[in-house]
Image (cartoon, grey):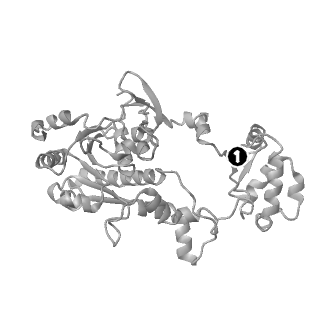
């Protein structure tokens, strides 16, 4: 692997995960140099490998799986057998971190609940990701991110006006938030262990991460007993923080958080001194009261010129703004490219292809190329032989 990051060099992660949240956490640690060993059931392995087929799209590659599992080693074990359990124990004994997002009841049945692993391997950090947490009457409930992160926490309803249906969200967003949350807690425990020599159980969940993500709105509700509903863009009370369309149909956001401070620059960029003189729009409070009229005036002005025109005018007059990119435009955005947002994954045949990079760069160790995601059980013999385990026991 070229351009290897070594921040977690020497750290071994044994990962018993599936779908997205758990694998993404392990994927971040693999990107950062850890030896991540992914335990999978023999045969089909992680069901995320075939998610497109399960949704009716046929036998297609799953780029998201490749993204979250690159650079790992796969060991196929039947954990219901004595030999599989013995091999798993050998792996745990060699591990610094045991990462799992399997449901609590399943883990307990296998003898791999956080408490059970911690008792047998007290120096191992047990990092568990769940849908709804490990305690409470619904800890058993399956929790894909659409349920536990988006729906249960209020996010899906809060970001649309109350009279509208909850918004349909893209899969994986809540999972990746939660994967990063798990990694943050795991790294804190790893730091602690360096001095204490003791591991501990680190718990994260889609539910808790979602409540934290929407926390600014939750604390307003806690404090005042009410929360202002989201508004349609045509009537939002903050027209300086709103999306608008240029004449060529491209969308952008104004980011005038300090509305009165940013107002003169916007007026100059639009060449609309008449709006500044209009008594309905003089102050932020005035523009809030007359938001619909002010937004309508901005819509008319912005529709008169293409995006390139407004981009130049905004930058000339220090207007804070951002393009509202489509995903296709993200791939063409030079600033996103320059920020290091993309990485090359080796295809195993001497070539490579583009993927999304992890969101952290360590000084002097930019990750530019990484190994591919493994086939199910690709490294079973290699990994277990390193531990001195008799692979023939697996049959």
Q: How many dots with numbers?
A: 1
Reply above or below: 41 against 373.
below
Q: Which quarter of the image is occupied by the C terminus?
A: top left
Q: Which quarter of the image is occupied by the N terminus?
A: top left
Q: Is residue 167 left or right of residue 92?
A: right
Front in this rendered view, residue 335 or 87: 87
Where disc 1 sits, the SS reads strand
Q: Which residue is mark 1?
A: 251
Q: Is residue 12 in view from this perspective?
A: no
Rendering coords of residue 184 (x, y %): 38, 52
Q: Is residue 342 in view from this perspective?
A: yes
Q: Write down the quadrant of residue 12 in the picture.
A: top left
Front in this rendered view, residue 82 or 174: 82
Rendering coords of residue 338 (x, y %): 55, 33
Label 1 crowd (10 A; few <14 / some 14-19 / many >=20): some
Rendering coords of residue 117 (x, y %): 19, 56
Q: Is residue 170 left or right of residue 318?
A: left
Q: Is residue 20 left or right of residue 81?
A: right
Rendering coords of residue 311 (x, y %): 73, 40
Task: Name the residue located 35 percent from the left edge and 43 percent from the top edge.
Answer: 29
Furthest residue toward top: 350
Task: Name the residue located 40 percent from the left edge and 41 percent from the top edge.
Answer: 65
Furthest residue toward bottom: 225
């Amino acid at each position: 692997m070229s351009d290897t990051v070594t921040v977690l060099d020497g750290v071994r992660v044994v990962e018993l995960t599936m779908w997205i949240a758990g694998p993404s956490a392990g994927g971040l640690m693999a990107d950062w140099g850890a030896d991540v060993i992914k335990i999978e059931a023999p045969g089909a392995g992680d069901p995320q490998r075939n998610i497109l087929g399960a949704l009716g799209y046929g036998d297609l590659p799953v780029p998201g799986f490749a993204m979250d599992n690159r650079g790992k080693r796969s060991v196929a074990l039947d954990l219901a057998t004595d030999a599989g359990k013995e091999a798993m124990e050998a792996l745990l004994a060699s591990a610094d971190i045991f990462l799992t997002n399997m449901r609590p009841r399943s883990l307990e049945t296998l003898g791999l609940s956080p408490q059970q692993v911690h008792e047998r391997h007290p120096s191992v950090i047990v990092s568990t990701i769940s849908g709804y947490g490990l305690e409470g009457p619904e800890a058993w409930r399956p929790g894909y991110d659409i349920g536990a992160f988006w729906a249960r926490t209020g996010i899906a309803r809060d970001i649309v006006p109350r009279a509208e249906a909850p918004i349909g969200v893209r899969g994986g967003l809540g999972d990746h938030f939660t994967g990063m949350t798990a990694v943050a807690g795991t790294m804190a425990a790893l730091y602690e262990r360096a001095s204490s020599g003791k591991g501990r159980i680190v718990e994260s969940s889609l539910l808790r991460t979602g409540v934290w993500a929407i926390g600014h709105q939750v604390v307003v509700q806690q404090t005042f007993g009410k929360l202002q509903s989201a508004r349609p863009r045509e009537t939002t009370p903050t027209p300086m923080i709103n999306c608008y369309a240029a004449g060529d149909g491209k969308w952008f956001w104004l980011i005038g958080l300090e509305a009165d401070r940013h107002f003169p620059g916007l007026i100059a960029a639009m060449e609309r001194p008449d709006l500044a003189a209009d008594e309905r729009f003089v102050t932020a409070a005035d523009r809030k009261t007359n938001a619909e009229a002010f937004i309508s005036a901005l819509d008319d002005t912005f529709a008169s010129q293409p995006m390139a025109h407004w981009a130049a005018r905004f930058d000339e007059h220090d207007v804070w703004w951002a393009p509202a990119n489509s995903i296709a435009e993200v791939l063409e955005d030079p600033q996103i490219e320059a920020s290091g947002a993309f990485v090359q994954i080796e295809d195993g045949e001497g070539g490579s292809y583009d993927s999304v990079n992890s969101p952290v760069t360590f000084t002097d160790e930019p990750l530019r190329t990484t190994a591919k995601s493994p086939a199910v059980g690709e490294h079973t013999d290699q990994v277990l032989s390193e531990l001195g385990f008799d692979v023939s026991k697996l049959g």
